[in-house]
Amino acid sequence: MVFILNPKVSKEKIDKFILGWEQKGFSTILSVGTEHTAVCLIGNTAEVDLDHVVQTTDIVSYGKRITEQYKAVNRTVHEDNTIINVGDISIGEGFFTVISGPCSVESEEQITEIARSVKESGAKILRGGAFKPRTSPYAFQGKQAQGLQMLRIAKKETGLPIVSEIMNQTQIDLFEDVDIVQIGARNMQNFDLLKEVGKLKKPVLLKRGLANTIEELLMSAEYIVAEGNSQVILCERGIRTFETMTRNTLDLSAVVLLKQKSHLPVITDPSHASGIRSLVPPLAKAAMAVGADGIMVETHNNPAKALCDGAQSLDLEQFHALMEDLKKRAALEEKEM
């Protein structure tokens, strides 16, 4: 159940309203938007007289019953689109934010060269894997803490915010200077980790699991928001289907549904979705066409010698060409890049 409050209600009145419900045994989530403020009740609300509360509480405009299990990330609770700011970079409605960089940080020279190039092409955020979850225990596992330090150097050189994947909650302290913490597909339902990043005061990029439903993705986002961190970016990165010609299958319908069901920004990862370099540009353009708020694309200064995922990485010239095309399309879509 959610109550939408009247405009310009004082903090004291909101706190008193929330306390009243918590004293009755309910958990509450306060959601503050640009136009609306909502209070969501968590618990058995079957016996709550919704109409009576609306009629007798002067700060409440109206109320709704929510049937979905996800509450705080539900558009019913928070009608305004969430815009997430990373420094002077915005992610959300009206923007098409491009995140780019190598699958894995390999050296200081490599990540710095790539960072300079993708920034010049128009990317707003630098990605780079330091801790790499690999199917094989014998595959390259990343530079780990050293890789994060290399990312920080590239950030200092270029001014680009950085995003990197965390593997477990014991690594939280290592990510203090990382602007966006990424939860990878394999950790989408690592609930202890989700709770811990929910306590952070920084954006979290949450990737959909390889074989998870849209509702399960939203429930994982709910774990993060329920802990107090509403800065969640959803990422459709392809799901496992019966198709074997591509690495995964990019579910573009998920982008549309997520935008309808939730107020959180949604991006796609066409690199992991396809696993094939030549498919990345058309899938990136398709993501913009269906309303995604951005993309995360893997780039490398020498894909043929990349330590991982070279086959799906664009070289720097290919990335520049993609960005030039996307900028033209963004102008037509009236999106800021």
Image (tube, grey):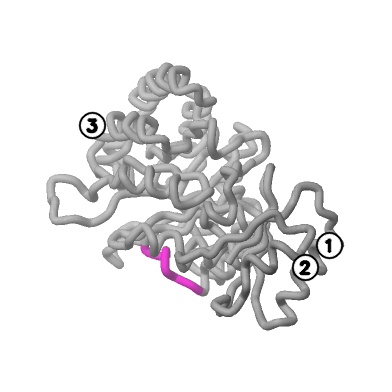
Q: How many marks?
A: 3
Write the residue at 77% across / 68% down. Answer: 17
| Residue 108 shows in the view | yes
Which residue is tagged 2?
A: 17
Mark 2 surroundings: few (<14), some (14-19) or many (≥20) residues within 10 A: some
Which-is-in-front pick, marks 2 and 3? 2
Q: CA distance from mark 3 to mark 1?
A: 57 Å
| Nearer to the camera, 214 or 24 | 24
Which residue is tagged 3?
A: 278
Contact flag, marks 3 and 1 (Cβ < 8 Å): no
Examine the structure image and report whether residue 189 is included in the region drawn in magenta.
yes
| Nearer to the camera, 77 or 188 | 77
Q: Secondary structure at mark 3?
A: helix
Amino acid type at circle 3 is Ser
Write down the region rendered in magenta: 186-191
Answer above or below: position of 214 versus 336: below
Mark 1 surroundings: few (<14), some (14-19) or many (≥20) residues within 10 A: few
Amino acid type at circle 2 is Phe
The label shown at residue 13 is: 1
Which-is-in-front pick, marks 3 and 1? 1
The image quadrant where one finds the N terminus is bottom right
Residue 59 horizontal side relative to residue 94, left or right: right
Write the residue at 54% across / 54% down. Answer: 76
Contact flag, marks 2 and 1 (Cβ < 8 Å): yes
Amino acid type at circle 1 is Lys
The part of the image, by quadrant, that contains residue 158 is: top right
| Nearer to the camera, 298 or 13 | 13
